[in-house]
Image (cartoon, grey):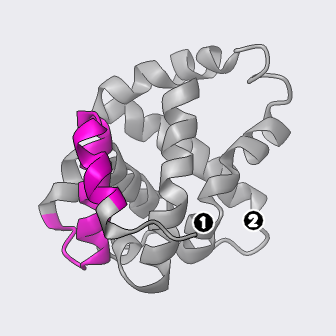
Amino acid sequence: MPITKDQILAALPLMDKADLKAVYLVTQTLLGDAGTVLAETPTGWLCEALASTTGASTVSFTQGLTGKAFTRNAPVFLEFVNKHFKESMKRKTTALSVMRFLLKLIKDDLKEPTARKLVMNLHFISDVFNRAFPGYLDGQAAKFIEATLM
């Protein structure tokens, strides 16, 4: 059952600032007007990390089919990063370092990596990480990787 506009509007006052920013960003992206709003958010940092990992422009991750896949898959990736690499997300430079590391894991996992395929596989980060570092998440040892990257 699809969510109605009225349900979305009713939920907005109940959201915290981070959730409201996420809604704003997705709305801007869907309207094709991500612009500078994107740059100073974790989602914008992810675009920057993707660009440096793939060589594509940051704008390419907010438009067309890749943009739709990004809007759908980026929240899963960012949730993973926030959960397991929480300290890194406090500063842009450390967040970019962790994101590039994780994106490289996904890229190495793909047979023919392209920018679009990388974006389409963002939501598999947990599986990819577990294959690369078995048991690290269960034992909460991801903090050791985080410390190395910081």
Q: Are marks 1 and 2 in contact (CB under 8 Å)?
A: yes
Q: Please determine whether, in this image, residue 31 is positioned above or below residue 136.
A: below
Q: Which mark is residue 146?
A: none
**Residue 31 part of the magenta-drawn span:** yes
Q: Which residue is mark 1?
A: 118
Q: Callout 1, which amino acid?
A: Leu
Magenta stretch: dominant secondary structure: helix
Of callouts 1 and 2, the N-terminal one: 2
Q: Nearer the viewer, residue 41 or 30?
A: 30
Horizontal placement of 63 versus 97: left or right?
A: left
The residue stretch that appears in magenta? 7-35
Q: Residue at x 56, y 49 (%)?
A: 76
Residue 37 percent coordinates (x, y): 16, 57
Asked whether the viewer can see residue 147, the reply is: yes
Q: Nearer the viewer, residue 112 or 6?
A: 6
Q: Residue at x 63, y 73 (%)?
A: 117
Residue 78 percent coordinates (x, y): 48, 43
Horizontal placement of 94 versus 117: left or right?
A: left
Q: Circle 1: is it few (<14), some (14-19), or many (20+) Cα within 10 Å?
A: many
Secondary structure beneath dot 1 equals helix
Q: Which mark is residue 110?
A: 2
Q: Please determine whether, in this image, residue 103 is positioned above or below residue 143.
A: below
Q: Please determine whether, in this image, residue 142 is positioned above or below residue 134.
A: above
Q: Quadrant of the N terminus?
A: bottom right
